[in-house]
Image: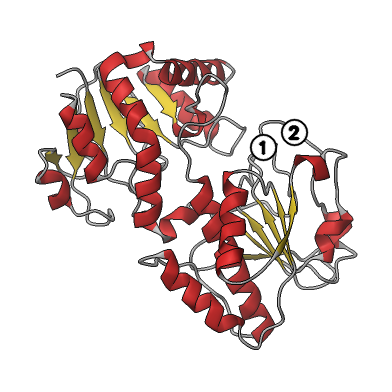
Amino acid sequence: MSATIWLRHETKKNEKRTPLTPEDASKLLAKDIRVIVERSPIRIFDDSEYEKIGCEMRDSNSWVTDAPVSSDVYILGLKELDDTETFPIKHQHIYFAHIFKGQEGAEDVFKRYKEGRGKLYDLEFLQNETGRRVAAFGFWAGYIGTALAVESYIHEEKGLGPCPLRFFESKNDWVKVIKNKLLDCKIPNTIIIGALGRCGTGAKSLLTDVGLECTPWDYEETKKGGPFQEIIEHDIFINTVLMSKKIEPFINNELLKSNDTLRIIGDVSCDPNSDLNPIPVYDDHTTWDNPLYRCKQSKSNLSVIAIDNLPSALPRESSEDFSEQLISHLINLGLKGEEDYTWKNANSIFEQKKGSH
């Protein structure tokens, strides 16, 4: 066989997604690419679905001790490795590491890679020759982030208490819930920044599905530089811009001192600990159980939602979409290795970032 893709069990709380569905795993096997799948009690697809198509099954987290340290073995996951572990990383990994933009804890992760001489192909930085990402959860992040923002707004308006994030079998189930809650509620006026991108498209799609409209902003509306008074003239603000360079913030604490209208900020991009964060009015992620961060500096009640694994609330649909985007590139990796541009470029980005730490 030409290479091995080792799908690891996810260890992050509330994470049922996978970057490789059984259907797409079968496409790797058809190309004579070995697929090993760690058993997982939480993955949205049952272990049996992988086993019956010919994947080799292993115990959860067995990559640490059992996976060969080899140039043709790739450990595939979605979210960060267990941050309580400190052993040197020797393997080749594929996942969203969230360490390339000055995030908290990045130094420790780079240290582990340096000590173990392992490699990281960060899913966020898998790009084609034009610099566009080849696989992303953006649409579903935007869709789910906006769904939670709208539902949280309704709860605030009706005094229903906190609205936790939870799993849904399908987006249609969630749409029905929101439509019912919108009855007899003040209709929110929503602004989306980054409306033309993947996330923004997902955000607009949710609003359309529940019968709401929005003010769509993108580069043309923001190129003059913030902060923007227009944002606090809306009830809900959805940020879907994935920053690659530092800009003037969209809003800041000074602007919030005069806020009378804005109730919910849905920060889908969610980089509170990054130097590039364009919404510097909060400094930590929120959680599924407690999704709202109260902005005390606001003149009126305002909360931020900043959850970093939003797409997991619709794990089946988001996994199927992401795996479909990624599979051709996994096949290229399995057959060509780093000869393929997308993977060679991702490794170059990692080496550059690692060298600066």
Q: Is residue 80 left or right of 4 when viewed as pictured?
A: right
Estimate how packed mark 1 is, as few (under 14), some (14 to 19) or many (20 or more) residues with alpha carbons within 10 Å: some
In the image, what residue occupies the spot 61% across and 65% down?
Answer: 207
Residue at image location 19% in from the left, 40% down from the top: 37
Q: Which residue is mark 2?
A: 246
SS at mark 2 in the image:
loop
Residue type of the residue flagged with mark 1: Met
Identify which residue, 3 or 10, lies in the foreground.
3
Q: Are marks 1 and 2 in contact (CB under 8 Å)?
A: yes
Residue type indicated by callout 2: Lys
Give SS at disc 1.
loop
Indicate whether 146 appears above or below 164: above
Q: Please provide percent x and percent y for residue 143.
A: 54, 58
Quarter of the image with the N terminus in it: top left
Label 2 CA crowd tier, 10 Å (few <14, some 14–19, many 20+): few
On screen, residue 313 above or below 351: below
Tell which residue pokes out farthest to the bottom in this image. Answer: 184
